[in-house]
Amino acid sequence: MKREQFSSSLGFVLAAAGSAVGIGNLVAFPVMASKNGGAAFLIMYAFFVFFICLPVMLAEMSLGRHTRQNPLGAYTEIGQNRAWRTVGWMSVITPFMIGVFYLVITVWIFGYLGKSVLGQLNELAAPDSFGNFINSNELFVYMAVVIGLTFFILQGGVKQGIEKAARVLMPMLFIMLIALVIYVMTLDNAMLGVRFFLIPEFDKLTGKVLNGALAQAFFSLSLAMGILITYGSYIQKNNNIVHAGKMVAGLSVLVACCSGLLILPAVFSFNPDIQLSTLSESSISMIFTFLPKIFLAMQADIGYFGASFVAGFFFLLVFFAALTSLVSIIEVPVCSLMDQKGVSRRTALFSLGAAMIALAVICALSFGRVELFSNLLSYGGLNKSFFDLVYDIFYETILPLNGLLLCLFVIYRWKKHNLDAEISQGNSTFAGSLLQKYVNFSLGTFIPLILAVIFVNTVSTIFFGKNLLF
């Protein structure tokens, strides 16, 4: 079967940016930054994106383009042993399981979008609204629609599905983000939020804060999920991987900056005396419990329907970000099944979709509705639901391990000269450049060391309740 390809480098950049720009980048990042040094945190985040994450991005994209394979196929073809094949399996199972809980969160966002459009802002701003919604039967109606949209995009394949959706959704997302930023800047006390976000406080950059900035950079670029290996396998040989990687990294930083200029001015317009320490850095808490109150408060100036429109506009923005990320996550196991078993895209989608939907339903039922799923296990001194278990294992824990193994595989199994040769295709200036030396050195030394430390500390913190670093 002939390998599908993106029609251009721009198509890949938009698709990869769609994967990178998720709900964490849009909502949690501004509060995290404002609590931890403002512009100082933003500067460190950008530093980590370009000096730690970019080399890993280039490694993933190059590995995918060289092998024309999914993660499992790439590790198997070059690794030539059972151990590396196991790593390949980890790189496929991880995005599949991340897709399970990400589907549930996307459904929540779509539900709030629907309620905003229907003018139910009073209901959304009520204290018990979120808890009632996630345990309601209507949740499964929204789930059916989200699943339908996701499968519709994926069924179209690389050019007519993923790339076409990215070419429409990503420009719309950027336009909507800028429009909302311009609007919130007109609100009273908006400049207070801008000040908290853009005035650097370098004394707040503790070890814990730097670790948070690095983790945010690593996760926000969809690294170690197998996405960039899979998307890399669709890149044309004459495309400039370095240029594409820099574009994706730059767009991620730009969105993070714009999101700070959106969320924080809105927060301070709602309450100019608010203490940022009281705000949660959780995307879920911000989107579903705090921001609806801000939108409702806007009705004093623009009326109830105007406030509902702004709320709907915001949730549409976040939904686009979530949907493009969800599509990229699910494409990894879909591509893997197609490559390994030689099945059609439709067969792969329906086979994996059935399993993913079943697990997503269990996740959706694990917030008090079904006791077995809501209190499944206890570790790290806390009771954990099925949703928590999937999140802790596959998102928090295995991702840094996958990143560590990827670095070791590329440098010490695939070898540096093969990586250099692949990146040099489409970029004749890479060979012998300072960037080449830095990529080779960083991937073989301090980046895997950093990821190893993060992995060990994550395991200790989550599963044993002991933070070894801070």
Image (cartoon, rainbow, N blue to C red):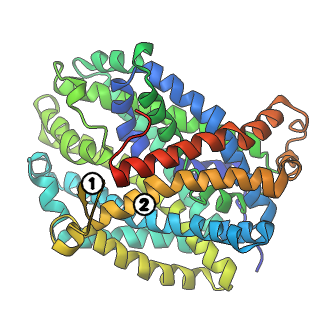
The residue drawn where x is 53% and y is 47% is 20
Mark 2 residue type = Ile
Instruction: Please state if 157 lies on the left or on the right of 276 as rendered.
Output: right
| Image quadrant containing the N terminus | bottom right
Q: Secondary structure at mark 1?
A: helix
Q: Which mark is residue 47?
A: none
Instruction: Please state if 338 lies on the left or on the right of 102 as rendered.
Output: right
Is 353 placed above or below 423 here? below
- Residue 24 at x, y percent in the picture: 40, 44
Is 46 placed above or below 233 here? above
Q: Secondary structure at mark 2?
A: helix
Viewer-side residue, 235 vs 210:
210
Name the mark nearer the viewer: 2 or 1: 2
Instruction: Please state if 178 lies on the left or on the right of 339 as rendered.
Output: left
Mark 2 residue crowding within 10 angstroms, few (<14) / some (14–19) / many (20+): some
- Residue 209 at x, y percent in the picture: 42, 29
Callout 2 touching callout 1 (CB < 8 Å): no
The residue drawn where x is 10% and y is 30% is 300
**Residue matched to label 2:** 393
- For residue 246, which quarter of the picture? top right
**Residue matched to label 1:** 113
Counting residues from the start of the chain, the first of labels 2 and 1 encountered is 1
Estimate the spatial distance between the alpha carbons at disc 2 and disc 1, rounded to whole Å. Answer: 29 Å
The residue drawn where x is 65% and y is 44% is 448
The residue drawn where x is 20% and y is 30% is 278
Mark 1 residue type = Leu
Viewer-side residue, 382 vs 338:
382
- Residue 25 at x, y percent in the picture: 43, 41
Viewer-side residue, 73 vs 380:
380
| Image quadrant containing the C terminus | top left
